[in-house]
Amino acid sequence: MPSLVLPSEIAKARFRSFNLKASGSGAIVRQAKLAEGAGAAAGAGAAALPVPPALFRAASNSRPDVENQRKMHALYNDYIDGITKAITNAFDLWRAQAFFRGIMINGPVAVGGSLEGPSLEPFIVAAAPQSSLAPASPAIAAGIASAWLSTQQSVKVPGLPWYPSFAAFPGPVAPPTPNVPMPFITLAQNPMPIMVASLKESMAGKLKAKVEFSNELFDSIATWFNAAIQAWKGMQMVALVMGMGPVPTFAPPYVPVGPVVGGDNLPTPGHLMT
C-alpha cells in the first residue's frame, strides 16, 4: 500500500540549506562563515561534524563549539526523523478510514462526491517525538491537519468512466460494483493549501510557544510533506468504490439493457487502501 514513502532526508536537506551555525554558547546565526584561524583556538584535535550529514556548522574547531554542534545536530536530526514518522503514521491511519460519499453515477460516468476522513492532528500529536523541540509538534500537527483538510474537501471525481458495465446493464437495478481503479492524481483537487509556502504559514500560525529555528524547521517539514504527498498522489489507486443505481429504461423483452441513471456509491472506508 502506498504511503508517504519519501525519506526524512528531504527535510534535512532543506534544513541544511539555511546554513545555520552553532557556537559554543549555544547561539545560532544564519548564513555565517567560519572565521579564519578559528580552528587554531583552544581545543586542538576536536573535529567538527562535516556538513552533510550535520545539520549545523560548527563555529570553530574549539571543543565547546564542536560539542555544541554535535548536540544541536543530534537534537534536530532526531526530531525531524521522529516528526516525519509521526506524520506518515497519521496519514496511514487517515487512509484506512477515508472514503468517498455522494458520487453521482450516470451510465459509466462518475461525477462529484466528497472525500471524507478523520483529522490528522490527534494522530500526529499522539506519535510526536518528546524532546526540547516538542512544543513545535502541536503547531506542526495542527498546521498540516488544517492544510490537508482544505485539500481533502476540494477533492471531486471529475467525470471518470469508473463503471463501464453501467452503460448498458441487463437489469432493473445495478448492484454494488467496484469502480475501475485509477490514480488519486486523476481526481480534481486544490493543491494550494499544501504548497510549501502555504503549509509553512499554516504551521507558523499555530505555534503557541517559542521554539528555536521554528521558521527553518517548519519550512523543512513543509518541503518534505509537499514532496511526499505529490509522490503519493501518483502511486495511490482509488479502488473498491462500490457504485450502484437504477436502470429506469429497462423493460424486457423490448429493452433488455439500459444505462444506470441517478446512481451513487456506498460510503464505506477502504477506497484508498489498494
Image: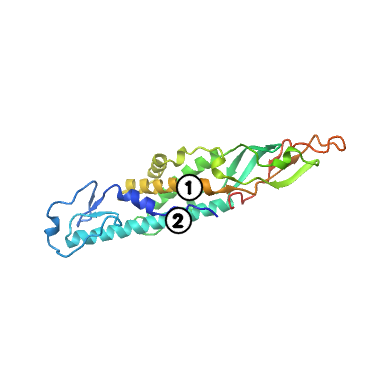
Residue where numbered disc 1 is placed = 231
Is residue 7 left or right of 255 when viewed as pictured?
left
Q: Please, is residue 232 above or below residue 126 in the view?
A: above
Quadrant in the rendering for residue 23: bottom left
For label 2, count other residues whose C-alpha is less than 10 Å away and answer few (under 14), some (14-19) or many (20+): many
Residue 270: x %, y % from top left:
61, 51
Report how far apart the C-alphas of labels 2 and 1 lie in the structure.
18 Å
Check disc 1 and report its element: helix, strand or loop. helix
Residue type at mark 2 is Ala
Residue type at mark 1 is Ala
Q: Residue 200 carries which label?
A: none
Please indicate, yes or no, whether residue 209 appears anywhere in the rendered image. no
Which residue: 23% across, 46% down? 31
Residue 37: x %, y % from top left:
12, 55
Q: Which mark is residue 86?
A: 2
Q: How is the image coloured?
A: rainbow
Residue 274: x %, y % from top left:
59, 52
The quadrant the N terminus occupies is bottom right
Tag 1 or tag 2, which sits nearer the N-term?
A: 2
